[in-house]
């Protein structure tokens, strides 16, 4: 494993019409590290993901991923460097099949030529078969193989969450950003998701940043946790340290301890 950080974020800030949604944020994330980011509603967590993925360029600061400065890069360019994400509100191609959803994710790295696609030349057909094989392998990994032909919006909520993760993984990321993947899940679904994230992290050697309100999920799989409040990083450490930090308790409970 490389001894250099995969992601370096320095003094990151984002303001909207004078409101500081994020300020002074910093992070050094190593390859194959899993970090949790928690905080009350409105703390700036999703703004953080939006700036890291180019959805909203930062007002100030620097983002370096895998040795490249991506501070002002477009979302597509950032995805191609190896950063993928999921969203609070699930984003799927709802009228397409589960298999086709994952194939679309894989197309981000496909190198089809227009004339080969139009003429259906042998090279195009071979690549299509390869994409389908890769898509089915991802569905198997996410325990979705039995639903390959189902329409995406016909899946139960928990499986739609898994499908969104499969689409993100299809882009072959080095870093996966998960934005509240357990939101709306019952305890059984959340427990299953926690084990899935841990397994993907281990088997695929991914770096993961996890935003999550479900403390059981965060504390169960993250070795390092950051806490945001009003856009500022107020605490960072191991789960047991975070649970006892008076600044964190005040942010969540609204009273000093």
Image: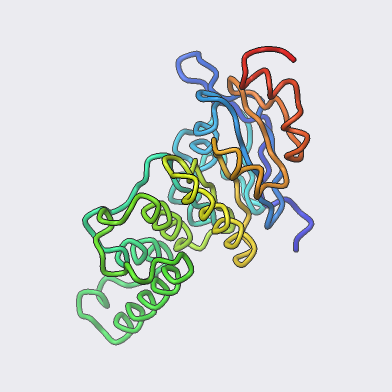
In this picture, residue 29 sits left or right of residue 155: right
Position of residue 256 relative to residue 77, above or below, is: above
Position of residue 99 relative to residue 256, above or below, is: below
Tell me the residue at 72%/28% (across/down): 235
Residue 257: % across, % down: 75, 15
In this picture, residue 1 sits left or right of residue 109: right
Tell me the residue at 68%/35% (across/down): 226
Residue 3: % across, % down: 79, 57
In the image shown, does 240 or 4 lie closer to the viewer?
240
Tell me the residue at 39%/69% (across/down): 110
Tell me the residue at 54%/40% (across/down): 52
Residue 19: % across, % down: 51, 15
Identify the coloring.
rainbow
In the image shown, does 46 or 244 lie closer to the viewer?
244
Furthest toward the bottom, the residue is 122
In the image shown, does 182 or 209 lie closer to the viewer?
182
Residue 31 picture quarter: bottom right
The quadrant of the picture occupied by the N terminus is bottom right
Number of marks drawn: 0
In the image shown, does 215 or 105 lie closer to the viewer?
215
Residue 4 picture quarter: bottom right
Residue 191: % across, % down: 54, 51
């Amino acid at each position: 494993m490389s001894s250099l950080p995969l992601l370096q974020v320095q003094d990151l800030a984002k303001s909207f019409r004078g409101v500081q949604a994020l300020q002074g944020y910093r992070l050094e994330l190593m390859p194959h590290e899993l970090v949790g980011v928690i905080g009350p509603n409105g703390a700036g967590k999703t703004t953080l993901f939006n700036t890291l993925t180019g959805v909203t360029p930062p007002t100030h600061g620097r983002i370096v991923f895998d040795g490249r400065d991506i501070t002002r890069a477009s979302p597509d360019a950032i995805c191609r460097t190896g950063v993928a994400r999921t969203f609070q509100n699930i984003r799927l191609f709802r009228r397409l099949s589960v298999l086709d959803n994952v194939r679309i994710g894989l197309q981000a790295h496909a190198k089809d030529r227009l004339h080969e696609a139009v003429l259906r030349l042998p090279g195009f057909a071979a690549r299509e078969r390869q994409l389908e094989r890769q898509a089915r392998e991802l569905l198997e990994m996410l325990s979705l193989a039995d639903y390959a032909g189902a329409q995406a919006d016909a899946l139960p909520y928990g499986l739609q969450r898994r499908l969104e993760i499969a689409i993100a993984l299809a882009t072959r990321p080095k870093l996966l950003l998960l934005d509240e993947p357990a939101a709306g899940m019952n305890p059984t679904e959340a427990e299953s998701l926690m084990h899935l994230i841990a397994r993907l992290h281990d088997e695929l050697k991914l770096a993961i940043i996890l935003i999550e309100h479900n403390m059981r999920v965060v504390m169960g799989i993250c070795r390092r946790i950051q806490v945001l409040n009003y856009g500022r990083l107020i605490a960072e450490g191991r789960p047991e340290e975070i649970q006892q930090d008076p600044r964190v308790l005040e942010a969540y409970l609204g009273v000093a301890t």
